[in-house]
Amino acid sequence: MRFTDALTGLPVTIYTYAPAWATPRFNELEIVNAPHDRPDTFRTLSLAVNKRYSKRWNLLSSFWITKNHEWIQAIQPTPNDVQFPVDNTWNWEARASAWCFLPGRVQLGAFYRAASGVPGQRTETFSSPLLLQGPVTLRMQPFGAQHGPVIELINLRAAKTLALTDSLSIEATAALFNLFNTSAATSTSYLTGPTYQHITGIVSPRVGRVGFELRF
């Protein structure tokens, strides 16, 4: 059957089955395994640089990048599922954390994280009484054609230890999460229609926290 892509206006072919097959006689369950010629593969390169504690500070950092080759559906039950079936995207993440120990039993720490944006692909749902299997949702472009922004976060923490007695102390801490209050998208709708490219999830907003810990 021929439909029209609501975004581009181009024709779209969708497969259905003959009315003669729409009977309980053809309604059977079949147990199948993923085909052996469709393996998922992931190739990752990772690096780490660490500075051990000296001169009152240390640093931990890492970076990894992964090339994906993953079948979006291990089993393709109908001809409508063969379009753009593979995720061939790249993902990466960088992290760094540092601590500084100052005189007076004061500690300062910082954490940084950056990650590649969340990939996606445009989809579209087609509906017609002539589609005996019901509405059909098609993948309309390769996975990764849509991509969210890079996600960056910076967290800070400070701590001060106060000795009350030889065996009793209290540690006061203050932390700030998402220092610059970024609102990068963590999920987005790519379904063609009124919600196309609408952001459905963002990074949590800036949060401050103060705490006290009694040690004995």
Image (cartoon, rainbow, N blue to C red):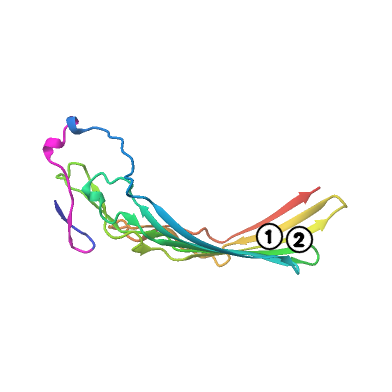
Which image quarter: residue 111? bottom right
Return the residue at label 2: 160
Q: Where is residue 191 in the image (x, y as percent from the top left)?
A: 31, 56
Do we see residue 36 in this rendering? Answer: yes
Is residue 10 shown in magenta?
Answer: yes
Q: Residues within 10 Å of mark 1 (few under 14, many from 20)?
A: some
**Which residue appears at 31% of the width and 38% of the height?**
32
Q: Where is residue 198 in the image (x, y as percent from the top left)?
A: 36, 60
Q: Position of residue 189 (x, y in %)?
A: 35, 56
Is residue 195 shown in magenta?
Answer: no
**Which residue appears at 46% of the width and 63% of the height?**
116
Return the residue at label 1: 174
Numbered label attached to residue 184: none
Magenta range is 8-24
Q: Which amino acid does label 1 sit on?
A: Ala
Do we see residue 96 in this rendering? Answer: no
Q: On the rendered structure, is 67 left or right of 15?
A: right
Q: On the rendered structure, is 58 left or right of 164?
A: left
Q: On the rendered structure, is 107 left or right of 89?
A: right
- Label 1 sits on a secondary structure element that is strand
Lower position in the chain sequence, tag 2 or tag 1: 2
Q: Between marks 2 and 1, how big is the CA–CA gap?
A: 9 Å
